[in-house]
Image (cartoon, rainbow, N blue to C red):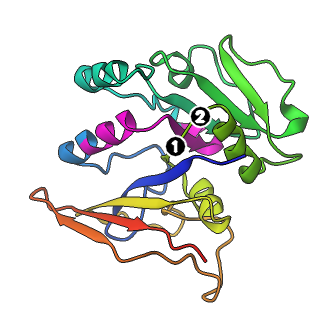
Amino acid sequence: MSRPYVLINVAATLDGKIDTHDRQGARISSERDLERVDRLRASVDGIMVGGRTLHDEDPRLTVRSPELRASRVARGEPEQPARIAVTTRPGVPPTCRFVTSGTGRVILLVPLDVAHQPVPKGVEVFPAGDGRVDLRLGMATLGGLGLRRVMVEGGGSLNFELLRLGLVDEVQVYIAPLVFGGGGAPTLADGAGLSRDAAVRLGPPSVEEWQDGGVLLRYMVETS
């Protein structure tokens, strides 16, 4: 079973942080970058986050522009892309934004041993792996559901595992003219880390310099 095309999108500071050390979802994107992200969301079939982002930040993961939503409908697509979370804790409140925002499907990829736990009405649960989520199986599951393009919006641990497993096709990074510092602040790719020889290799970047002081980088992930 084929997996979707996977795009990681990140807004980061100059020192590589995607949030401050207190991990409360600090805003990094400029207004122009928020518009870019909305267009990206409108172009995909699903938007994915990891468990920590889900439970700590309760993201909406929706297309905000009415025009972009209308364009999706005109193309014969759902008004909103699916909202997807990879988590070992499937318990989400029925009133959280992840569940209630927009009209798209709400999908949880969870380990088999917690797949039976109750979830709010309308939330679809798919077991993928035992003890922890098998991301290869999870991505194949999404492909089987008809999702062709998935955008990943963090956090750093999920990004790292997807990159490590060769499940990412493209990375887009908006570098903001900010410095957060903090040894415990999350970065684009956290996790256990890789040796130099095992590093994920990226192709040459596309680079855009913006008047807001930021830089947009787009990389294609090289396949071995």
Instruction: State the image quarter where residue 106 is shown.
Output: top right
**Residue at 69% over, 36% down:** 144
Q: Which amino acid does label 2 sit on?
A: Ile
Q: What stretch is highlighted in magenta?
A: 36-56
**Residue at 59% over, 34% down:** 84
| Side (left or right) of 2 relative to 83 | right
Asked if the magenta segment contains residue 5, the reply would be no
How many residues crowd around disc 2 within 10 Å: few (fewer than 14), some, or many (20 or more)? many
Marker disc for residue 84: 2
**Residue at 63% over, 89% down:** 197
| Side (left or right) of 212 relative to 42 | left
Judging from the image, what secondary structure is the residue with disc 1 in? strand
Residue 147 spot, x, y in % from top left: 57, 36
Q: Which amino acid does label 1 sit on?
A: Val
Asked if the magenta segment contains residue 42, the reply would be yes
Q: Quadrant of the C terminus?
A: bottom right
Magenta stretch mostly in which secondary structure? helix
Residue 116 spot, x, y in % from top left: 87, 24
Judging from the image, what secondary structure is the residue with disc 2 in? strand
Instruction: State the image quarter where residue 86 is shown.
Output: top right
Residue 61 spot, x, y in % from top left: 45, 32
Task: Say if mark 1 contacts mark 2, CB within 8 Å.
Answer: yes
How many residues crowd around disc 1 within 10 Å: few (fewer than 14), some, or many (20 or more)? many
The residue carrying mark 1 is 150
**Residue at 87% over, 37% down:** 112
Kindly report which numbered mark, 1 or 2, lies closer to the viewer in this rendering. 1
Q: Nearer the viewer, residue 77 or 94?
A: 77
